[in-house]
């Protein structure tokens, strides 16, 4: 029991160090993201923006409207619906009717790939005009007006950079438990680690929220053909660019995701899929359980319920909530309620259960279908 208590205590102190480091890195990132975008090349590169769609929601319609408002001198936007019968076709037709004069391309269809989103992107690319930059922005994301300008300026600031990707924060679409928990996870778990990664490691991955790659680099690495069946397509695309000898850069531009999970079960299912994917393609990501301060502080409290353990638990809880509030309000300037702060520790303890459940199988729900994650990083649909 003594050794177990010492181990838990070590992870408690590690968590406290992580919270402080994340707050410092977050402040640095916030300052960078609020500076004006850098200069573009004298002849602004043409940009092809791909947004694959699936299903229908009013939030997704608003996301597309937001994308059409980006300020960039030479860009084409492609919306890709699964088919004319999918709910996403309603979004395409609604946007075309609302913006009839916009420079917008719409496609219907996808290739039968293991990863349906990649199959749709490949279909869209074949039907889109040539551009100097291929940019893929997730359907759940919203961007600032200067997002494309900022990302392209960073992509062309150095010839050694082949790909630029964006960290994301989140707003819940509704004041429901599932959406709020998912937004809290993104803002207080994913984002702090992504920001620390930007400053403390050579980035070899990309985030699906936004990926911008020079077209000549994209073609040189074989485009999307090699990763059409992979469940970690964003990570694999970043790895391929890094393996080619070019740099992958994390942008100062932030994408705001709109979380639409409604229930605790939906949050659990989405997180379980994410943790199982991480376990397969980037196992080190599962190590973030070691900086789950409330969990380790609670174990310390149970293994030695004394005044020191009580004080330590209080300090960890206060620091965890302070870091969460710092990321949400200071770094991302998002609204924050007292109820959300109360949910932080509850969400952290839920993640322990999800982490444990992620080791109990390789089946996930993806695109409304059950799929198996294979050891070689690919997906197979369950018959």
Image (cartoon, rainbow, N blue to C red):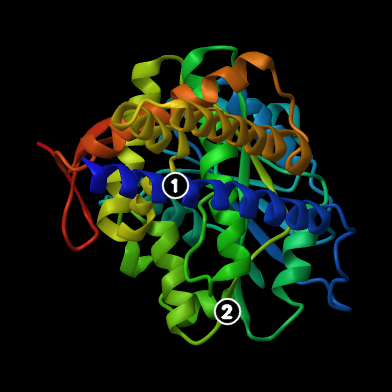
Q: What is the secondary structure assignment of the residue under circle 1?
A: helix
Q: What is the secondary structure assignment of the residue under circle 2?
A: strand
382 or 352, which is in the foreground?
A: 352
Q: Earlier in the sequence, mark 2 or mark 1?
A: 2
Q: Quadrant of the C terminus?
A: top left
**Is residue 259 depicted above or below 81 in this figure?**
above
- Mark 2 highlights which residue? 247
Return the x and y of residue 210 as percentages of the image width and height.
59, 53
Q: Residue at x 44, y 67 (%)?
A: 237
Left or right: 2, with 107 as reference point: left
Return the x and y of residue 73 as percentages of the image width and height.
85, 60
Q: Nearer the viewer, mark 2 or mark 1?
A: 1
17 or 198, which is in the foreground?
A: 17
**Is residue 365 depicted above or below 262 in this figure?**
below
Let me know if residue 284 appears in the view.
yes
For label 1, count other residues whose C-alpha is less than 10 Å away and answer few (under 14), some (14-19) or many (20+): some
Report the residue that reaches farthest toward the left.
383
**Is residue 305 depicted above or below 118 in this figure?**
above
Q: Residue at x 48, y 78 (%)?
A: 242
231 or 34, which is in the foreground?
A: 34
Q: Residue at x 55, y 30 (%)?
A: 317
Q: CA distance from mark 2 to mark 1?
A: 29 Å
- Mark 1 highlights which residue? 291
Return the x and y of residue 269 as percentages of the image width and height.
32, 28
Left or right: 357, with 16 as reference point: left
- Label total for image: 2
């Amino acid at each position: 029991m003594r050794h177990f208590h010492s181990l838990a205590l070590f992870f408690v102190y590690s968590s406290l160090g992580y919270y402080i480091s994340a707050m410092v890195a977050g402040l640095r990132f916030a300052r960078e993201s609020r500076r004006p975008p850098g200069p573009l090349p004298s002849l602004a590169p043409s940009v092809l923006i791909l947004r694959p769609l699936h299903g229908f929601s009013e939030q997704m319609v608003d996301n597309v409207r937001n994308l059409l408002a980006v300020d960039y001198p030479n860009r084409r936007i492609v919306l890709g619906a699964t088919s004319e019968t999918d709910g996403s076709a309603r979004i395409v037709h609604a946007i075309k009717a609302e913006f009839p004069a916009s420079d917008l391309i719409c496609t219907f269809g996808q290739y039968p790939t293991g990863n349906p989103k990649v199959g749709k992107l490949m279909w869209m690319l074949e039907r889109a005009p040539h551009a100097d930059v291929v940019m893929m922005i997730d359907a759940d994301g919203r961007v600032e007006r200067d997002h494309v300008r900022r990302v392209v300026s960073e992509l062309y600031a150095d010839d050694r950079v082949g790909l630029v990707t964006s960290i994301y924060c989140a707003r819940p679409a509704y004041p429901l438990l599932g959406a709020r928990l998912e937004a809290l996870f993104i803002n207080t778990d994913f984002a702090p680690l992504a920001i620390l990664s930007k400053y403390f490691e050579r980035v070899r991955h990309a985030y699906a929220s936004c990926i911008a790659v020079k077209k000549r680099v994209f073609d040189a690495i074989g485009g999307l053909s090699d990763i059409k069946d992979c469940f970690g397509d964003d990570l694999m695309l970043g790895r391929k660019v890094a393996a080619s000898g070019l740099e992958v850069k994390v942008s100062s531009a932030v994408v705001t995701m709109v979380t639409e999970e409604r229930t605790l079960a939906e949050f659990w299912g989405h997180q379980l899929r994410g943790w199982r994917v991480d376990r397969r393609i980037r196992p080190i990501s599962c190590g973030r359980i070691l900086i789950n301060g409330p969990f380790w502080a609670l174990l310390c409290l149970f293994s030695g319920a004394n005044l020191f353990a009580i004080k330590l638990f209080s300090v960890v809880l206060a620091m965890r909530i302070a870091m969460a509030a710092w990321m949400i309000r200071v770094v991302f300037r998002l609204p924050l309620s007292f109820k959300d702060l109360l949910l932080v520790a509850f969400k952290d303890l839920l993640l322990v259960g999800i982490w444990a459940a992620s080791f109990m199988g390789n089946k996930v729900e993806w695109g409304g279908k059950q799929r198996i994650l294979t050891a070689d990083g690919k997906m197979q649909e369950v018959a």
